[in-house]
C-alpha cells in the first residue's frame, strides 16, 4: 500500500491538543495497541530495546514451537525468567491510565460517548492487574462486579497460562507458582547487563508437567508462526476504530503491527506513544515521543 511521503496529513505533537480532542467527544471507538514499551517502566525489559532481554538469544529463536520442540529446557528457562520478572513487576502509570479509560464513568469525563478497547501484545498480565487495581480503587463508584469495563485482549497469550502439550488432553491452567517446578529454581538471575544466562539442561521429566495427564506442559503464549488469540474480535474492533493509540511497540510483529494503518485506511486517526521513532510513526496523526508512563497519563488525564 503506497502512502505518499508528502502526505497531506499533518503530524501533531501537542498533548494538550490531543487531550482536548478527546474531551470534545470527537471519537466514538478508541483502541489501544500495546507492546513491551508499556511495561518497560515496570522493570520488564523490552524485546529489542537497550535492556532487550533477548540480546543473547534472538527473539525469533526462542519464542517458536520449533525451539520448544528442540530444547524445551532452554525455552522453559526463558519463560521462567519472564514469569519471575512479571510476578515481581507492578503496573506503572501508563497501565493505570489505560485501565482508567476502561471504566465507563472515567471515560465519560476523559473521552465522552466513546467505546474503548485494549489490545495488548504483552504476556505479562500487568494490564489485567492494573484494571483490577483501578476497579478496587473505584469501589465507591459502583459495585465492581457489575461494571462492564472495556475489553482487554491479550492477543499473544499469557505467561501464567500453562498448556498441556498432549492433543488428547489440552488442559489449560492459570499457574503463578514460583518456580513453576523445582528444577527451574536453579535458573540464574540475569547478569548485570540483563543478558540471560540460560544453560541448565533440565531433563524432560523435571520440566513443568500437565497437572491432569502429566504430559509435558508449555507456556500459554502465542509463539511466532502460531495464530494470535481473538483475531476475529480484534478485527471488528480495528474496523470500527476511529482512533488508534499505539503504545510502546516497535510495530514489527504482525498482525498487530498492521492495525494502526488499517484504522487510517478507513479514515481513523493514529496517535503513537513511544520512547523513540518506530515503524510507521511517520504516518501517525499524533506522535508523542517520550516515556509512555509520562506521556500517556497526560494525554488521557
Ligand atoms: C502469525 C509472545 C499467522 C511470546 C510474541 C514477514 C512479514 C510479516 C509477518 C511475518 C513475516 N515473517 C513471519 C511473520 C509472522 C510473524 C511476524 O510478524 N514476524 C515478524 C518478526 C516479521 N508473526 C507471527 O508469527 C504471528 N502469527 O502471523 O500467524 C497468521 C496470522 C493471522 C492469521 C492467520 C495466520 C504471531 C506473533 C506472536 C509472537 N509472540 N509474544 C513471548 O512474549 O515470548 S511477539 C513478542 O514480540 C511480543 O509479544 C511483542 O508482540 C513482540 C515484541 O514487540 P514489541 O512489543 O513492540 O517490543 P519491542 O521490544 O520490539 O519494542 C518495544 C518498543 O517500546 C520500542 O519501540 C521502544 O522504543 C518502546 N519503548 C521502550 N520503552 C518505552 C517505550 N515506549 C514508550 N515508553 C517507554 N518507557
Ligand atoms: Zn494434559
Image (cartoon, rainbow, N blue to C red):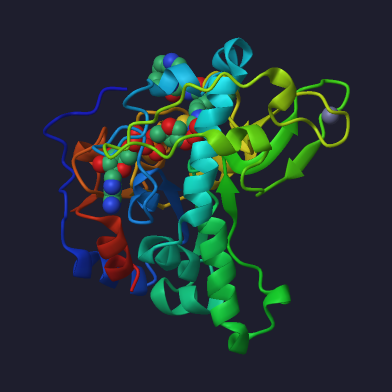
Seen as rendered, the residue at the extreme front is 186
The N terminus - image quarter: top left
Q: Nearer the viewer, residue 3 or 160?
A: 160
Residue 206 seen in the figure? yes
Seen as rendered, the residue at the extreme bottom is 140
Seen as rendered, the residue at the extreme left is 6
- Is 92 rendered above or below residue 11? below
- Is 286 rendered above or below residue 130? above
Residue 151, how many percent across, how many down? 60, 56
Residue 28, how many percent across, how many down? 47, 61
Q: Quadrant of ligand 2?
A: top right
Q: Nearer the viewer, residue 234 or 187?
A: 187
The C terminus - image quarter: bottom left
**Left or right of 212, for residue 230:** left
Q: Nearer the viewer, residue 92 or 11?
A: 92
Quarter occupied by residue 179: top right
Residue 245 seen in the figure? no
Quarter occupied by residue 232: top right
**Left or right of 105, for residue 242:** left
Residue 64, how many percent across, how many down? 54, 19
Q: Which residue shows up at 54% across the image and 15% down it? A: 67
Q: Which residue shows up at 57% across the image and 45% down it? A: 154
Q: Which residue shows up at 59% across the image and 77% down it? A: 136
Quarter occupied by residue 140: bottom right
Q: Nearer the viewer, residue 111 or 250?
A: 250
Amino acid at each position: 500500500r503506497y502512502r505518499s511521503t508528502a502526505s497531506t496529513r499533518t503530524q501533531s505533537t501537542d498533548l494538550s491538543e490531543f487531550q482536548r480532542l478527546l474531551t470534545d467527544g470527537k471519537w466514538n471507538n478508541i483502541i489501544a495497541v500495546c507492546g513491551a514499551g508499556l511495561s518497560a517502566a515496570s522493570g520488564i525489559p523490552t524485546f529489542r530495546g537497550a535492556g532487550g532481554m533477548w540480546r543473547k538469544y534472538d527473539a525469533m529463536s526462542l519464542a517458536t514451537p520449533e525451539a520448544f520442540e528442540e530444547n524445551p529446557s532452554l525455552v522453559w528457562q526463558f519463560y521462567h525468567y519472564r514469569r519471575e520478572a512479571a510476578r515481581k513487576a507492578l503496573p506503572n502509570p501508563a497501565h493505570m491510565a489505560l485501565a482508567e479509560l476502561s471504566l465507563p464513568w472515567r471515560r465519560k469525563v476523559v473521552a465522552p460517548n466513546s467505546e474503548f478497547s485494549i489490545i495488548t501484545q504483552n504476556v505479562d498480565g500487568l494490564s489485567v492487574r492494573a484494571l483490577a487495581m483501578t476497579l478496587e480503587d473505584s469501589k465507591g463508584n459502583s459495585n465492581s462486579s457489575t461494571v462492564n469495563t472495556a475489553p482487554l485482549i491479550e492477543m499473544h497469550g499469557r505467561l501464567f497460562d500453562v498448556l498441556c502439550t498432549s492433543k488428547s488432553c489440552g488442559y489449560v491452567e492459570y499457574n503463578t507458582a514460583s518456580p513453576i517446578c523445582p528444577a527451574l529454581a536453579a535458573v540464574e538471575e540475569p547478569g548485570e547487563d540483563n543478558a540471560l544466562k540460560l544453560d541448565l539442561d533440565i531433563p524432560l521429566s523435571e520440566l513443568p508437567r500437565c497437572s491432569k495427564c502429566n504430559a509435558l506442559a508449555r507456556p500459554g503464549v502465542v509463539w511466532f508462526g502460531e495464530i494470535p488469540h481473538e483475531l476475529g474480535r480484534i478485527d471488528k474492533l480495528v474496523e470500527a476504530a476511529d482512533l488508534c493509540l499505539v503504545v510502546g511497540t516497535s510495530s514489527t510483529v504482525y498482525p498487530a503491527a498492521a492495525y494502526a494503518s488499517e484504522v487510517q485506511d478507513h479514515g481513523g486517526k493514529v496517535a503513537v506513544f513511544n520512547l523513540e521513532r518506530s515503524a510507521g510513526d511517520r504516518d501517525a496523526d499524533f506522535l508523542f515521543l517520550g516515556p509512555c508512563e509520562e506521556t500517556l497519563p497526560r494525554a488521557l488525564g
